[in-house]
Image (cartoon, helix red, strand yellow):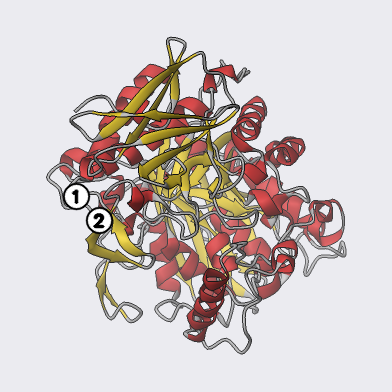
Amino acid sequence: MPDLMNFLGPHYENQEAIFTVWAPEKEQMRLHIVAPEQKVIEMAKDEWGYFSTRLTGVNAPLQYYFEPEKGKKLPDPASHYQPEGVHGPSQLVDHSRFEWQDATWKNIPQKELIFYEIHVGTFTPEGTFDAIIPRLKDLAETGITALEIMPVSQFSGGRNWGYDGVFPIAVQNSYGGPDGFKRLIDAAHQHGLAVILDVVFNHIGPEGNCFADFGPYFTEKYRTPWGNAMNFDDAWSDGVRAYFSDAIMHWYQHYHLDGLRIDAIHTMFDNGAVSFWELVSEKLKEAQQRFGRPFYLIAESDLNSPRVVQPTAVGGYDLAAQWLDDFHHALYVLLDKNGQERYKDFGQMQQLAKAYTDGFVHSGEYVLFRQRRHGASSAGLSGDTFVVFNQNHDQVGNRVGGERLSVLVDFERQKLAAAAILLSPYLPMLFMGEEYGEDAPFFYFVSHSDPELIRMVSEGRKKEFEAYGWDKEPPEAHDEQTFEKSKIDWNKRLTGKHNVMLRWHKTLIALRKAHPALGNFRKNDVRVNLAGNAFVLHRRSEDQAHEMACCFNLSDSPATIYLPESKPHWKKVLDSQDQEWHPDGSSVTDALPQNARASEMITLEGTGVVVFVSNSRPLRT
């Protein structure tokens, strides 16, 4: 089979524009040029089911449709840009015209990734790529090292989470299109920020979906929550595998992205002898050699399987990391007394301890939610193969009121939650606004034009929330006010409790970057000592020379803990009860002493966090 990289949408080659489309079961195909002039061209088909044609004297922007059946003109499934939306013509993009300024950019080492999830439409009042750029400096100064951008693939209308994307490699027109996205990525690199894009390979959005009109992109062998699964192992699946594996290379090459977060990989079914992920691994290795910088693939997976990040040689998927939902569930249920209504299989301190020392909490145990055993042990995996969070678009947006953690728990618990992920042996992720305690809701929103689809979305959301026993109905996803209410207020971070929370996050991130123990992701160097509803997270540097004792009290009452015996002396470096970490400038109690001995009993105030580091100097008596 030929190298299909150049078959993923139209491209330029030797001053010619080459148009290619996969339609293996079609006998003919026409290319309709609609702007700047109108022209109809018959396309030739090769043995692999690809129709193609070459045009000379073509300059972008050129707009076009394909005609797979007589009288049926449709956009390109591999469109690079849809300037008039999902129902309009596709547009030729000359990626070579963009003048990148990031020639020296080499990406961020995986161990140094601190993610910040952004929804483009609600992160700024304007809701565009260009509007994000002025905020990059502040994010970099906060300590963020990687933007994680929710999907930007073309969706119907101008308001959507992005998971209804219809053209996987066409950048949303209302956000700023291909050039706008490139400007954002280029600017992020100038500020030392990596950019990870969230992509969806498990389904195609409902409105404007024309993939089945071209070829067997879907299969009836498997079902997903969105209908028939993408065809990764059935008849004609070579073309589908080529499409999505080359989509990864497309983002890497043409947009200088630093990685992708791949949505719900557990709904990408493939029982072939050579898996889709093996194909991706081989292509990615070759591309990384060519481009000279790492490219991270991060999975959202419901499998609780270590195979996701294990090498393909041992049957793994060879992805760089995966989201660790179990960590979120284990911590959240202990912070919010109402949390167990949502996560009934969680609520024990031992589960949080296991989340820190192993990773997966459910590693073969019986799970009530699933009514079966679930998961496998991840104890041997390096911590930097997991991403942890207190909030993300799902955890907030899939609540009926779109409540953030700042609305669900008090200020002290918010501080505790921040410390829990930023001092963890995992890669932490913040949801936009979390660093200053944003309290605006984040709802689910759409802007479809099909009335029947709008009705189905509304009814579907209501039915989904019925299972949780909510006492109110979700806001209408199609209502523009639902979208407007979801926008964050960036100026909150400058004053009051929001500024205190921002400084708290900055301090934790600075500590994470500076202390050698927090840069060690080996599970053997992580210990958790429980004391009722309190615990000590004990971490060591790889050379064992530096240690840290992170002391947490999750209850409202004082708790007693003991410092580890491995080092004789300990020095306090952070105390959430100190005056500077309270919005009114007061302290809850007298500050703990700056120095302590090993095995010394320490009393932690309710919902407090205290961090000690090993101190080799003798203590004064």
Q: Earlier in the sequence, mark 2 or mark 1?
A: 1
Q: Nearer the viewer, residue 212 or 64?
A: 64
Q: Nearer the viewer, residue 615 or 548?
A: 548
Q: Secondary structure at mark 2?
A: loop
Q: Nearer the viewer, residue 541 or 317?
A: 317
Question: Would you call the spot at circle 1 few (<14 residues within 10 Å), some (14-19), or many (20 or more)?
Answer: many
Question: Would you call the spot at circle 2 few (<14 residues within 10 Å), some (14-19), or many (20 or more)?
Answer: many
Residue at image location 67% in from the left, 57% down from the top: 434
Mark 2 vs mark 1, CA separation in Å? 8 Å
Of tags 2 and 1, the one toward the viewer is 1
Q: Residue furthest left?
A: 273
Residue 294 seen in this snapshot = yes
Q: Position of residue 394 (x, y in %)?
A: 53, 64
Indicate whether 167 appears above or below 417. Answer: above
Q: Which residue is tagged 2? A: 269
Instruction: Give the side of residue 213 with respect to residue 535, left or right.
Output: left
Q: Which residue is tagged 1? A: 233
Residue at image location 64% in from the left, 74% down from the top: 476
Residue at image location 57% in from the left, 57% down from the top: 161
Q: Position of residue 228 (x, y in %)?
A: 30, 62
Instruction: Give the side of residue 70 with respect to residue 393, left or right.
Output: left
Q: Secondary structure at mark 1?
A: loop
